[in-house]
Image (cartoon, rainbow, N blue to C red):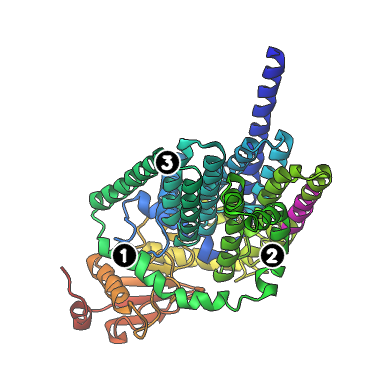
């Protein structure tokens, strides 16, 4: 008996070891293939800036949460400023996601070999789509972990999961508002139903205590770093809400083809829980609020939220990582059928085939980096730019057939910027430049993209607030020159509609480098009420 227990535990840890190694290494591998400048370097730069004292919302305008950038600063602190530690950040989260999926499925009594199977394939489809730290993936992981915790809390009446849930939701929300806010609503609804079914005042106490502690930590940091609350409200709540109308246009109309047929494999993977959800719903109230049915509501709600989020985002398709998770739960609940083995094999095969398909179609071709039809073998080792980018295989959609030309243009621009000792601001999608030069780029925005990140013009809501923020940044940091390195996905001239062109001299120094030299200008001084 003792020997059997020892072998079982040893087997368990071997599974964990291999799961960790595979989920970490698969993402680490893809993090080094290809570049999409506007996405690939934003957290790289933000993490570096935070490491060197910059404060989100206070020192740079950001409509995306600071959690991921702060975490990146910690990775740079302990592992050095390099592409390796940058990729390590996302690889670490990919492993956390895989291990959490494994433990959750195991708690639901799925055989360990199947837990390993579904978790490995989920990790292959999760972070490798981008490879490097990305907000949609981080918030997806925090959201999925919160769903796991609710499932386990309901299934096993374990209070520790109720304590963890508010923390995960908070971290998710301050990574990116959506879909974290949607998951908050879903979990609140399911939690209320659960209290009707299984009322326990300890649950309420644990949730309130956890919420209080995380909010206390948040406001303590805000006060310690003297971040204006008004900045947080404007940048993280009001301005993003003003973009909501545009995003809704991408969501509607809710056509069958767009909402269901396009994501049919997700619905098929979750077929068993969906079947039982509708079956129990039409029985009676006690069946509707049973433990399993609440879990079915959570899983189905997760599917709907991610489909809505995918339709409303401008980023690449990535939610197919849900197929192994949903198949795992369908596998678990297929035990209720007579031909349970037949169903189990179906979901195993579905997961394997869909993983191979999506891996080949999106991940191996670096589709989310806009490199689908580009020969990745033409890439160049980025160490020729700087050792901090060692082993990154550089190729972008801007220069698909000649990455050497792009790199040479960047090196020439970097040399010009390095030789200029004046206080400067860099406006670029290539946000590694300030990192390799070990300077502060004085960027007023985390990402330079009109409309999506900051208001595009005077007719837009909150434009005056953005204008004041940018000008204030220029004045307080005594910026003498602004360098714009092109191409930019969402910007042309950062000073357009901000100040008169009589307040600066503009010249093109090269094919990709523009300089704007600030002049003594009464308009610049009087345009903002400095405190």
Q: Which residue is mark 3?
A: 203
Q: Locate residue 519, reporting x and y percent.
A: 25, 79
| Front position among marks 3 and 2 | 3
Residue 251 versus residue 345 in the image, above or below: below
Q: From the image, state whether disc 3 or disc 1 is nearer to you.
A: 3
Q: Earlier in the sequence, mark 1 or mark 2?
A: 1
* Residue that badge 1 annotates: 233
Which residue was labeled with disc 2? 263
Q: Quadrant of residue 251?
A: bottom right
Q: Secondary structure at mark 2?
A: helix
Which x, y percent locates residue 394? 61, 59
| Residue 47 included in the magenta stretch of the image | no
The disc, 3 or 2, on the residue closer to the chain's N-terminal end is 3
Left or right: residue 224 compared with residue 241: left
Residue 88 visible, this orientation: no
Q: Which residues are magenta?
A: 348-358
């Amino acid at each position: 008996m003792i020997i059997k227990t020892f072998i079982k535990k040893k087997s368990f840890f071997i599974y964990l070891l291999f799961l960790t190694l595979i989920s970490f290494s698969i993402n680490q591998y893809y993090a080094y293939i290809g570049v999409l400048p506007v996405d690939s370097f934003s957290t790289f730069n933000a993490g570096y800036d935070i490491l060197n004292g910059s404060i989100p919302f206070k020192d740079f305008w950001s409509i995306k949460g600071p959690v991921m950038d702060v975490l990146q600063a910690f990775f740079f602190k302990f592992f050095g400023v390099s592409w390796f530690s940058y990729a390590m950040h996302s690889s670490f989260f990919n492993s956390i996601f895989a291990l959490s999926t494994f433990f959750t499925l195991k708690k639901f009594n799925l055989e360990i070999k199947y837990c390993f199977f579904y978790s490995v394939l989920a990790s292959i489809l999760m972070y490798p789509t981008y490879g490097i730290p990305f907000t949609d993936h981080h918030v997806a992981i925090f959201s999925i972990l919160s769903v796991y915790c609710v499932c386990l809390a309901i299934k096993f009446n374990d209070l520790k999961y109720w304590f963890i849930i508010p923390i995960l939701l908070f971290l998710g929300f301050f990574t990116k508002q959506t879909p974290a806010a949607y998951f908050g609503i879903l979990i609140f609804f399911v939690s209320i139903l659960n209290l009707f079914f299984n009322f326990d005042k300890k649950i309420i106490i644990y949730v309130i205590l956890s919420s209080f502690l995380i909010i206390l930590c948040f406001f303590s940091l805000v006060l310690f770093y003297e971040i204006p609350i008004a900045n947080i409200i404007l940048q993280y709540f009001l301005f993003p809400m003003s973009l909501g109308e545009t995003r809704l246009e991408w969501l509607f109309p809710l056509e069958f083809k767009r909402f269901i047929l396009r994501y049919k494999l997700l619905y098929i993977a979750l077929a068993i829980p969906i079947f039982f959800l509708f079956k129990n719903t039409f029985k009676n109230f006690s069946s509707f609020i049973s433990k399993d049915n609440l879990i079915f509501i959570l899983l189905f709600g997760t599917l709907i939220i991610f489909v809505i989020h995918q339709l409303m985002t401008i980023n690449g398709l990535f939610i197919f990582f849900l197929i192994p998770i949903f198949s795992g739960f369908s596998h678990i609940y297929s035990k209720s059928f007579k031909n349970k083995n037949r169903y189990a094999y179906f979901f195993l095969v579905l997961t394997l085939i869909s993983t191979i398909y999506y891996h080949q179609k999106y991940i191996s071709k670096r589709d989310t980096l806009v490199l689908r039809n580009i020969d990745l073998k033409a890439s160049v080792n980025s160490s020729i730019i700087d050792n901090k980018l060692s082993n990154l295989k550089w190729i972008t959609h801007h220069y698909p057939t000649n990455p050497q030309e792009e790199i040479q243009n960047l090196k020439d621009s970097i040399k010009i910027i390095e030789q200029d000792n004046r206080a400067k601001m860099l406006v670029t999608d290539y946000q590694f430049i300030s990192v390799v030069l070990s300077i502060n780029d004085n960027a007023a925005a985390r990402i330079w993209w009109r409309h999506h990140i900051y208001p595009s013009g005077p007719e837009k809501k909150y434009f005056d607030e953005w204008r004041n923020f940018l000008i204030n940044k220029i004045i307080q940091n005594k910026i003498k020159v602004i360098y714009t390195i092109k191409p930019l996905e969402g910007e042309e001239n950062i000073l357009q509609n901000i100040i008169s062109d009589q307040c600066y001299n503009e010249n093109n120094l090269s094919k990709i480098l523009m300089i704007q030299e600030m002049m003594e200008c009464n308009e610049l001084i009087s345009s903002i009420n400095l405190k």
